[in-house]
Amino acid sequence: MLNNFKLSTKFNLLLLAVFLGAVILSGVAFASLLSRNAEQEITARATLLLKTMLSVRNYTLTQINPELAPRLETEAQFLPQTVPGYSAREIFENLRTNSEYKDFFYKEATLNPTNLRDKADSFEAALVERFRNDAGLKELTGYRSSPAGDLFYIARPIQILKESCLRCHSTPAAAPKSQLASYGSSNGFGWKLNEIVGAQIISVPASDVIGNARQAFLFFMGVIAAAFALVLLVINFLLRRAVIHPLNQIAQVANEVSMGNMDAEFERQSADEIGKLATAFNRMKTSLVMAMNMLRGDQ
C-alpha cells in the first residue's frame, strides 16, 4: 500500500507515527508528574494546617485547661475553651473568615460527641470505623466532593490516651455540673481509655491546584504540537528542496534521454548524494551515446 504513495507522503506518515508515539509517551509521563506534584502541594498545605491545629490543641491542653478547669465546677455554664478540640475548631473557623481560606475545613468528627457540631456525618463516620477496625492505621488521605468543589482530606484517629479526658466523657455523674447544664447528659458519654472515638479531619480545596495542573498539561501539549508542526514544515521544505525537486529533475531528464533527446543534461547542483547521482547518470548517458555511435559505425 505504501508503495503507491509519494516519497514525501511516506516520510510525513513516518514522522506522524513517531510524533504520535512521542506525544502519547510524553503526555502520560508529564500528566503523571503534574498529578504527583499537585497532590504533593495539596498534601503539604493540608499537613501544615493539621500540624498547626495540633499545636493549638497542645497549647490548650497544657496552658489553658489547667487555668480554667477549676472553674468548671463553679461556673453556671461550661467553659468550652478548656477543650482542645473546641479551641482548634474555633481558631480554624476564624481563619475561614478570610476569603482565601473559606473553602478549607477542619473538624474533629466524633461518633458520640458532647457538642453535636462535632457529630460525624456518614462519610466521616466511615473513616472513623476504619480507624476503629485497624489499630495500626494512623492516617487516611483521599478526595471527597462538596459544594465548594473537590476536597483533599487528611484524617487521623482521635484516641483517648489520658484518663483526664474521661472526666467529661465517662458518665454523667463524673462530669462537671456546668457541662451537664450546657450540653445535657445524653451525648458524649461512655468513652473508654484507649478507645478511638473520632477522627481529626482537615480538608483543603483541590480543584484550583488540579485546574492549574490541567492548564499546565494543555499548555505543554500545545507547545509540543506547535513544535512538531514547525519541525514538520521545516523538514518538508528541506526534503522538497534537497531531495524531491532534484529527483524530479533527474527523472524528467532521464525520461527525455529515453525518448532520444541526447542533448539533455543531468544538472549537478550539489556535492551530496543527489549530485553524485546526477553525475553518475551523466556518465551513463555518455556511455550510452558512445555505444550508440559505435553501433551506427558498425552498420
Image (spheres, rainbow, N blue to C red):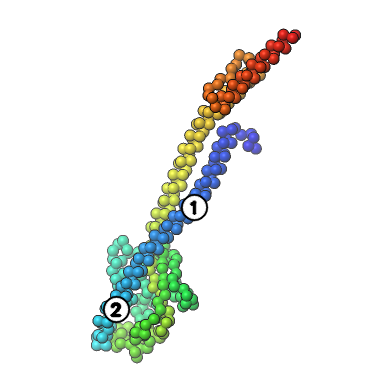
Residue drawn at the location 56% of the way across and 20% of the way down:
267
Asked whether the beta carbons under mark 2 and mark 1 sit within 8 Å of each other, the answer is no
Q: Position of residue 204 (x, y in %)?
A: 38, 64
Precedes in sequence: disc 2 or disc 1: 1
**Split into 4 quadrants, where in the image is the N terminus?**
top right
Residue drawn at the location 24% of the way across and 88% of the way down:
74
Q: Position of residue 198 (x, y in %)?
A: 41, 77
In the rendered structure, which amino acid carries the disc numbered 2?
Thr
> Between marks 2 and 1, how big is the CA–CA gap?
49 Å
How packed mark 2 is, by other alpha carbons closer than 10 Å (few <14, some 14-19, many 20 or more), is few
The residue beneath circle 2 is 62
Q: Secondary structure at mark 2?
A: helix
How packed mark 1 is, by other alpha carbons closer than 10 Å (few <14, some 14-19, many 20 or more), is few
In the rendered structure, which amino acid carries the disc numbered 1?
Ala
Residue that protrudes farthest toward the bottom in the picture: 173
In this rendering, the answer to whether 263 lies above or below 274 is above
Q: Is residue 66 visible?
A: yes
Q: Position of residue 286 (x, y in %)?
A: 64, 16
In this rendering, the answer to whether 114 lies above or below 28 is below
The residue closer to the viewer here, 55 or 153, is: 55
Q: Is residue 106 left or right of residue 2?
A: left
Residue drawn at the location 40% of the way across and 76% of the way down:
158
Q: Is residue 148 visible?
A: no
The residue beneath circle 1 is 29
Q: Quadrant of residue 162?
A: bottom left
